[in-house]
Amino acid sequence: MNKKEINYKGKKLITSFVAELSDDEFNQLRTDYYKKPSFKDVKNQFVKIYNGGTKNNDITNYYVKDLMAKTLIYYNKWSIEDVFDYKPLLEFFYARTLSNEKVFPPTYDKIKNIETAFRLAGKGVASKPSNFPMKTVDKIINKYNKNNNYYDYSCGWGVRLTSAIKNKVNYFGTDPNYLLTERLNQLANDFMNTIGVNLNVDIKSQGSEIFVPEWENKMGLSFSSPPYFNLEDYKVGKQSYTDGTTYDEWINNYFKPTIANIYKYLINDGYFIININNIGKNNLIKDTMDIAISNNFKYLCNEQLVNINRCFGAIGKPNECGFNDNSETIMVFTK
């Protein structure tokens, strides 16, 4: 069996999945991947979400898909943006789509099958970062909203913002990705204009470790899913993790001041809620508990986040499918 060696940005992949794309095909697939849905479809999705829906794929693809593509997940060699910048990498994923007609129907567009390959067979090479489930955000807001002021200390890809507007809650957010915050402000304006709602949306392009004095004693709820140390490198802005950051540095320079700030932002009896998981050998769940308690938070309970299991084929084994248990912990504290 022929094998191909792919070298890019100092990383190497040796694979038996080999196929060729012309330059025109390569450029067209890149265009197809980044093509936005129509704004009409986005507005329709806004209306459906406001009326109780949770599907937000068009919203995500319109506002942040290209920013998600920049993200490097720690177990991967490359980002999806890298794949569309280097033809041999895209040829690898194209070859994957030729390996199983049941999983990758030849009647589907090439780009649709390649996106499936990212999802099912990208682990270790390049894959898309996950998005937060809107049902969970809706549940948290409806159960723990105290005064209609909600602080999201790591804005993510806009799901928590969208849920806040859907549930008519004022949204305050921080995120160092300045490209992301610009998009989220536009998303908020478009959503509110579409449904005719006027809420206070204040998103700042900075890390949550930086204190915002005007938010002190203002928030009834603070809920987010912050970076799990080095799980994802977002590449834009002054992120809490960059290549070479140690776990202790991340804890001391980002995580501890973030939790201290949240305590100051919350009103008495307000809720600090965090979706967190252990990463590698680092016991992030225990450290979260210890830091929260040291900041005078009272632990209440856990809510459970159960993500859809991801099926992925090991490289070189296109017909084998393993499953990740993506159940994660949501810890609930009160001030």
Image: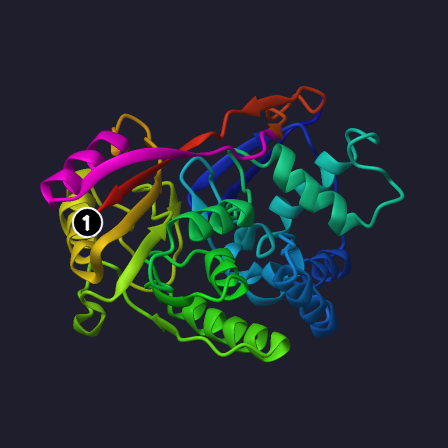
Specify whether 59 is left or right of 303.
Answer: right
Tell me which residue sits at (84%, 37%) in the image: 105
The magenta stretch spans residue 307: yes
Which corner quadrant of the image does residue 264 belong to?
A: bottom left
Tell me which residue sits at (73%, 71%) in the image: 38
Tell me which residue sits at (62%, 63%) in the image: 50
Q: Position of residue 131 (x, y in %)?
A: 52, 48
- Relative to 301, residue 30 above or below: below
Specify whether 98 is left or right of 241.
Answer: right
Q: Nearer the viewer, residue 273 or 244?
A: 273
Question: For the residue marked with disc 1, what is the amino acid?
Answer: Lys
Q: Position of residue 144 (x, y in %)?
A: 37, 50
Residue farthest along the right direction in this orientation: 107
Q: Is residue 241 visible?
A: no
- Relative to 275, residue 260 above or below: below
Q: Position of residue 288 (x, y in %)?
A: 22, 38
Q: Nearer the viewer, residue 294 or 91?
A: 294
Magenta residue span = 285-310
Point out the image quarter for the N terminus: top right
Q: Position of residue 8 (x, y in %)?
A: 49, 46
Q: Secondary structure at mark 1?
A: loop
Residue annotated with mark 1: 335
Q: Is residue 275 visible?
A: yes
The magenta stretch spans residue 272: no
- Relative to 49, residue 297 above or below: above
